[in-house]
């Protein structure tokens, strides 16, 4: 007979309002939202310890929060939209091909059917695959508590390894992608991992920008995962290449800037040296592109 | 906690702990043993079943999240005269796709879950390999499995 963890505490609110009221009344009890749950059971069953975390099961909020839609300002991804839901939205995937590229390398089809975009961001792992894409697209998090809603840009959302700005009484409601990159003619998502899918990234990189016929880059945004405690933008490199061609001087400058700003660690997946070399190569591979209209 | 679900067409009400895994409910509480426990971490796909029509790994889903859901396991397909299953069965036999068989129930459920998406088009071999990304075959018989699935899709695209 397998373990059952009979004493585990789970509460299932009927809708968003009820969930927020519950959190307001139990803010100091450590309730943790359970969305797709794909990263919730494994540590419990693997470690075998009686789970102490009380779970707030969001399953019944699906009718309210499982959607992906275009608005006048951009795309809105409901907090319970799954990775599969992103892939199924042709409008989003054709507007931003890096979304589909990333999702195709995100875990496995079975996990993509459960795992939510917001859960992946709230989990605050530096190895999140969707995080660099949403960072490069300058996404914002819409969160709510019983008193109201607020917006925070994604790059201000993580405060450290596995930590976010979310208060104990707060839930993500949606993730917003602003219409900022409709003119971009180049984008890239790359994940370095032992297998093409169902692997945790050694590092990953998402980039988007516009390159004119003379090779001059504008509106470049580059984001990297596993290169520090949180997924991060390479802002200094972005500034250095803005209105420039990616020539040898620019390449050396970008390399130096990456080396002075990224903070990869050595762990059982890869060494810091390997990560730095691969990240530098990925950023160069994107900026080296010689033709426009290239999304891959 | 009490959960209500439809398993292979039958309404069931069970009293289970909230974090009990769906795979344990199916295998131990209901005796439905087609889905296997391989890795228990979502890596191998041996436990895949359909929840509300989508193939998911039953080792990752707690009881509390299947309340009100419709579950289909391989046993359910096998007893429902499912044409898509019969065709896949034939294609797998023709290509010797099943060796020890541990991974096959999960792979069948993944294929069945994608059937409506796949039936109207002919996916590439690369796409079929992508579909299998969450499955580990301990006999390493992937080539025969891929050939079997491609054959199945060829059969399904015929009028």
Image (cartoon, coloured by chain):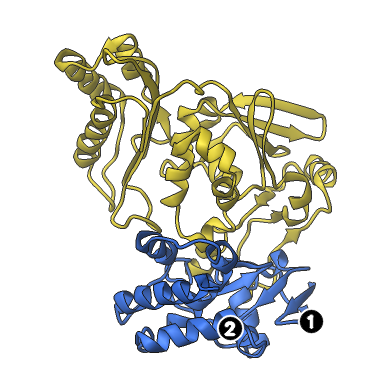
In the image, residue B44 above or below residue A292? below
Instruction: Look at discs 1 and 2 and give the one toward the viewer.
Output: 2
Tell me the subunit letter for badge 2: B
Seen from the viewer's position, the closer of residues A97 and A196 is A97
Q: Is residue A207 left or right of residue A258?
A: right
Quarter of the rendering occupied by the N terminus of chain B:
bottom right
| Front-most of residues A273 and A192 | A192
**Disc 1: host chain:** B
Label for residue B75?
none
Where's residue B56, x and y in %?
57, 67
Left of A115 or right of it: where is A146?
right
Local crowd size for mark 2, using a 10 Å CA cut-off: few (<14), some (14–19), many (≥20):
many
What colour denotes chain B?
Answer: blue
Q: Which mark is residue B12?
A: 1
Write down the residue under mark 2: B74
Q: Is B90 positioned to the left or the right of A235 in the image?
A: right
The residue sitting at 64% across, 47% down in the picture is A81
Point 48% across, 30% down: residue: A135
């Amino acid at each position: 007979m397998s373990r059952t963890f009979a004493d585990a505490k789970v509460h299932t609110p009927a809708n968003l309002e009820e969930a927020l009221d519950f959190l307001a009344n139990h803010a100091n009890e450590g309730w943790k939202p359970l969305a797709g749950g794909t990263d919730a059971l494994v540590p419990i069953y693997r470690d075998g310890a009686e789970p102490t975390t009380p779970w707030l099961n969001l399953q019944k909020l699906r009718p309210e929060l499982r959607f992906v839609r275009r608005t006048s300002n951009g795309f809105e991804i409901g907090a319970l939209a799954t990775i599969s839901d992103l892939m199924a939205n042709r409008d989003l995937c054709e507007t931003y091909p890096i979304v589909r590229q990333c999702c195709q390398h995100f875990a496995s089809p079975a996990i993509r059917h459960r795992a939510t975009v917001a859960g992946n961001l709230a989990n605050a792992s530096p190895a999140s695959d969707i995080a660099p894409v949403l960072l490069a697209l300058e996404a914002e998090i819409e969160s709510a508590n019983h008193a109201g809603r607020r917006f925070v840009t994604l790059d201000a959302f993580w405060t450290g390894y596995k930590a976010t700005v979310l208060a104990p009484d707060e839930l993500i409601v949606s993730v917003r992608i602003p219409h900022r990159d409709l003119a971009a003619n180049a984008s890239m998502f790359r994940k370095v991992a032992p297998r093409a899918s169902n692997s945790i990234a050694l590092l990953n990189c998402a980039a988007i920008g516009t390159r004119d016929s003379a090779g001059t880059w504008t509106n470049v945004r580059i984001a990297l995962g596993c290169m520090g405690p949180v997924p991060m933008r390479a802002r200094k490199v972005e500034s250095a290449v803005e209105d420039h061609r990616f020539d040898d001087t620019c390449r050396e400058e970008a390399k130096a800037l990456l080396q002075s700003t990224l903070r990869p660690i050595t762990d059982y997946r890869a060494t810091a040296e390997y990560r730095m070399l691969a990240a530098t190569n990925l950023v160069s591979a994107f900026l080296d592109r010689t033709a426009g209209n290239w999304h891959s | 906690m009490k959960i209500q679900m439809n398993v292979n067409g039958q309404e069931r009400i069970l009293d289970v702990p909230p974090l009990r895994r769906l795979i344990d409910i199916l295998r131990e509480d209901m005796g439905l043993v087609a889905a296997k426990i391989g890795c228990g971490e979502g890596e191998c796909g041996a436990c895949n079943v359909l929840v509300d029509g989508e193939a998911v790994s039953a080792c990752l889903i707690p009881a509390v999240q299947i309340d009100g859901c419709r579950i289909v396991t391989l046993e359910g397909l096998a007893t429902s005269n499912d044409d898509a299953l019969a065709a896949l069965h034939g294609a797998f036999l023709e290509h010797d796709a099943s060796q020890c068989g541990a991974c096959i129930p999960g792979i069948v459920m993944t294929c069945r879950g994608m059937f409506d998406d796949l039936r109207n088009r002919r996916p590439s071999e690369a796409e079929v390999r992508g579909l299998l990304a969450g499955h580990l075959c301990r006999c390493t018989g992937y080539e025969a499995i891929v050939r079997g699935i491609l054959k199945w899709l060829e059969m399904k695209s015929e009028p």
